[in-house]
Amino acid sequence: MMNDSFKALLTKSADKFLAELESSDSVRVFAHHDADGLCSAALMIEFLRFKNKKFHLTILPQIESRNIKQLEGKGLLVLCDFGSGQLNELKDVIKSRKVLILDHHQFDQANNDDNLIHVNPYLSGVNGNSGVSASGVAYLFIKHTGFSPNAVIALIGASGDYQDVNGFKDLNQEIINECCGVIERKDLRIYGANTRPIHKALEYSSIIIPGVSSSGSGSINFLQELGIELMKDGEWRTISDLTSSEKQKLISAIIIKRNGVDKPEDIFTTVYEAVNENGFRRNLREFSSLLNACGRLGRASIGISVLMNKDYDELALEVNKEYKELITQSLNWFENNKSKCLETDRVFYLRAGDGIKPAVIGTICSILSNSGVINKDLIIGMALDNGLIKVSARKARDNDFNIGLALKKAIYGIGEGGGHNDAGGAYINKESVELFINNIEKILKE
């Protein structure tokens, strides 16, 4: 249940925002480029349209010194899925204009300026890492203005931040209880059932399948032995393309392969699907992947449009196809260059340089962290991005290391970034890579 403190924060913030909105001719909105950011932006746009307010939306990969000037100006400013971790960098912006921050990231300092309306679950003791995403915060905030936003969009954003792992909980569960457009069911615990080629979904699955997991040739041979075709009409098939008999054959074969593994039948998870008025089902995680592709490839407008109008589906699917090809190329690069990367006792440093594009380095780290390929506590990817190094960090196994706070400490004086307990990102100076690695290693020993 939502605690009284967060409820009071939402009510107070919504009232203050409505008063500011009343006297504003237009609103400047900025949002993060991942699925959660795009969903947050879509919810805010939906609300501003209802209020007949003009707005200008910009999507950014992050708020940092090189783009902070874009946030300067007059009038009402709204930041979705970032801002909490950049309060120090934003202090001059906040002094000069009214700012609303809808975020769920950790932060280590507060800003009590009267110009700031800061809505973040951590301000009320709510876990923003697993209990609610930025789009969930946006949904709850807008709901407190008296408008009824689209709960499905909030849950898609939460799924994009992996908050559906082991089932939605906390505030996300409250949102799903209010939502009639989402169903939950049990299915294979394999990511990419709608988007990845079957053999790649199996190869990088979090389910341990002896002889198949982490092996491209093993996954292909496994499927061929089952008589499951990998391609149809020149296109790679996905798990969702399988017939019911093929799906059952695959499930049985996976359980048999796992004989000797602890709980060989433990291969299912809770899956959430959005259902439209025609009964069409869409996996929330797969939908969030579609949005993620649009945002990270610079086609955020398509991602936001597909949330509001199904006529944009084909365009979004084309972008997603391009994104999948980029991921496949990046995984192939990893397989061919793994030995060139740096491994320490607890960290695998994926030093990609220009071998993996910065748009997908975080996705590659996520795939590897869930696949069991890397037997370390952390995976930290580093890719060249316009003269800087983009850093993406993920946990590869359960541990009590707080990535977001550790990144903040490790990049002090050499970059900008932050994140959550389980994942984070940053930009650092190219010449500071070794210092950054040394800092991470020191923090791990503290």
Image: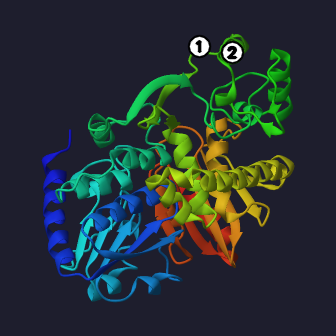
Looking at the image, residue 342 lies above or below residue 243: below
- Circle 1 packing at 10 Å, graded few (<14), some (14-19), many (20+), is some
Quarter-of-image position of residue 274: top left
Query: Is 376 situated above or below 33?
Result: above
Q: Does dot 1 land on a helix, a strand or a loop?
A: loop
Looking at the rendering, in which quadrant would you find the N terminus? top left
Q: Position of residue 395 (x, y in %)?
A: 56, 45
- Residue 285 left/right relative to 55: right
Is residue 293 placed above or below 28 in the rendered structure?
above
Front one among 46 and 402: 46
Coordinates of residue 267 in the picture (x, y in percent): 58, 21
Q: Is residue 324 left or right of residue 2?
A: right
Residue under label 1, please give it.
Answer: 265
Depth check: give the residue in front, 67 or 135: 135
Residue at the location (63% across, 67% down)?
Answer: 390
| Crowd band around label 2 with a 10 angstrom C-alpha radius: few (<14), some (14–19), many (20+) | many
The reply to whether residue 366 is visible in this rendering is yes
Q: Which mark is residue 258?
A: 2
Alpha carbons under labels 2 and 1: distance apart: 8 Å
Residue contact between numbered discs 2 and 1, judged by CB atoms under 8 Å? yes
Residue drawn at (21%, 56%) of the image: 147
Q: Amino acid at mark 2?
A: Arg
| Residue type pointed to by label 1 | Glu
Q: Is residue 88 left or right of residue 333?
A: left
Q: How many marks?
A: 2
- Residue 437 figure quarter: bottom right
Residue 93 sits in quarter:
bottom left
Q: Position of residue 289 (x, y in %)?
A: 57, 48
Residue at 73% of width from left, 32% of height from top? Answer: 198
Q: Secondary structure at mark 2?
A: loop
